[in-house]
Image (cartoon, rainbow, N blue to C red):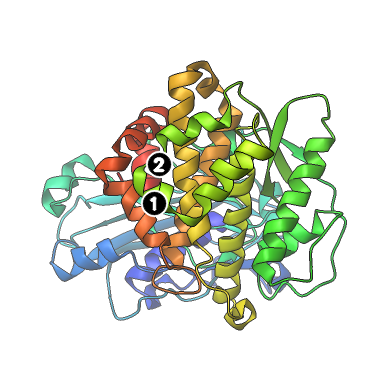
Amino acid sequence: MFLNKTFFSVCAVTLLMSCTINTNDGLQNPDQSRMSSIVMLIPEQIKSFVSDGRLDAYSLSIKPVVCDDGVVGRSIIKVAQKISLTNSKLADEKIVRGCSYTLAMSLGKSDKSRLKLDKVFLTNDQDGRRTEISSAQTAAEKIKVTAVLYVTDDGKSDLKIQGQEIEVPSLDYSDVDIGVNIGADDFDWKSVLKTVDVKNYGWSGNDNGSEFYRDILSHSERKLESEPATTNAHETQHFLNNAVREATRGVKDNVIYVGGGKAGLILEPSMKPREIRAYVPAEMKKASRYDQYLVRQVDTSWSDEVLYIFDEWSGYRADVRVSIEMIRAGKGSVIGNEVCIGDGAAEFLHFGSSAVSALKAKEPEYLKNLQFKAAYALLAEETVSYVKAGAGDQRIDCKASKYLQYFISSPEAEQNRNTIREWMGSAWTKRVLGF
């Protein structure tokens, strides 16, 4: 269901009016609690294709496969609909909750029989990860929508582009968790990371529109609530990580809280964290948090725990995620006078990547640890996503965008770029980090 919603969003990007749902497909007086929706933006790259005359139409197919008892799905087929750039935001399309959908979409020239861009949205089902989403998931789960359009091999020359994937930015949440197939050699941390359940202690405070803020405070018995929301989130994330880690006392491991009552446990490597310093690019050694975390804290309190760096990264990732969610909910005033919230996560993207380079040199076998790889992917993906979302907003971005670009293009960061590309694969690295 969620999937079908995503498809709408891409379609509606192209033509707002033609993506409305056909209400004559057998759905009688639908229970509104069994509906969901997704809103998405037109990718800038798609806009440029339309403006340049390389692209002018799309076709869309959404077919329900299985529905829960009492819920009837709707199928939608659109062929050679003209793309319009009049609207940059999709309509709030409704789709039926409780149904499994198979979706397909293509974009191209309306006068050609063969369209040049296509994408199939895939689910994150643990089994086949194919083009269906289970009814059980559609009835229960909630996660952010993501989507990617792929350029067919025969369309690259016509569209005059080199890359294969085009990100479709997501704006909203839905009641179903979907994933996207982004290439054969891509890395999907959701399908790899093994998690433990974290108890929900409940929380009755005001989340000001941040689902992740409520998530963190609800799943930690010990909470900080007296400071600004991002500080509360950061420190409570540490309390939560520590509580889960303490449950495995006797095992040298660390914890990354994923969300939704799930946390990943990662065994510590043998390498000492001081080794990381030699792989931090020169510019990032000037960053405000380098001396605090990689020098003073490592020398005094965390001399044996490389994953301490990733615990701190998870805290700064919580800062920026919560702040962006509040801004998107129209509650940005809650942030108050805080500034530069995303800088910390961007700095730790460098520090975490430097740790990977150090491990490659000092303890290469450890990089085969898929729990560690999944934790890096999770933190990197969320860091890049939320830093980009806050670009140019001083509440989020003082140096964060600069640090991200430094990672992407600076000669000083080349060693770390090469390490991450080799370790994570070119498809993941291109999709997430942009190089």
Which class describes the residues within 10 Å of circle 2: few (<14), some (14-19), or many (20+)? Answer: many
Instruction: Tell me: 4 left or right of 281.
Output: right
Question: Number of marks in the image?
Answer: 2
Asked whether disc 2 touches disc 1, contact meaning CB atoms under 8 Å apart, the reply is yes
Q: Answer whether residue 70 is visible to the viewer in this image.
A: no
Q: Residue at x 15, y 54 (%)?
A: 159
Ranked by sequence position, the earlier of labels 2 and 1 is: 1
- Secondary structure under tag 2 reads loop
Q: Residue at x 61, y 38 (%)?
A: 298
Cα distance, mark 2 to mark 1? 7 Å
Which residue is under mark 1? 148
**Along the line of sight, the residue nearer the viewer: 176 or 334:** 334
Q: Answer whether residue 93 is visible to the viewer in this image.
A: yes
Quadrant in the picture for the C terminus: top left
**Along the line of sight, the residue nearer the viewer: 38 or 361:** 361
Type of the residue with mark 2: Ile
Which class describes the residues within 10 Å of circle 1: few (<14), some (14-19), or many (20+)? Answer: many
In the rendering, at what x and y percent does residue 222 appear? 85, 56
In the rendering, at what x and y percent does residue 361 appear? 43, 21
The answer to whether residue 278 is above or below residue 295 is above
The answer to which image quadrant residue 41 occupies is bottom left
The answer to which image quadrant residue 87 occupies is bottom left
Q: Which mark is residue 182?
A: 2
Instruction: Tell me: 162 left or right of 232.
Output: left
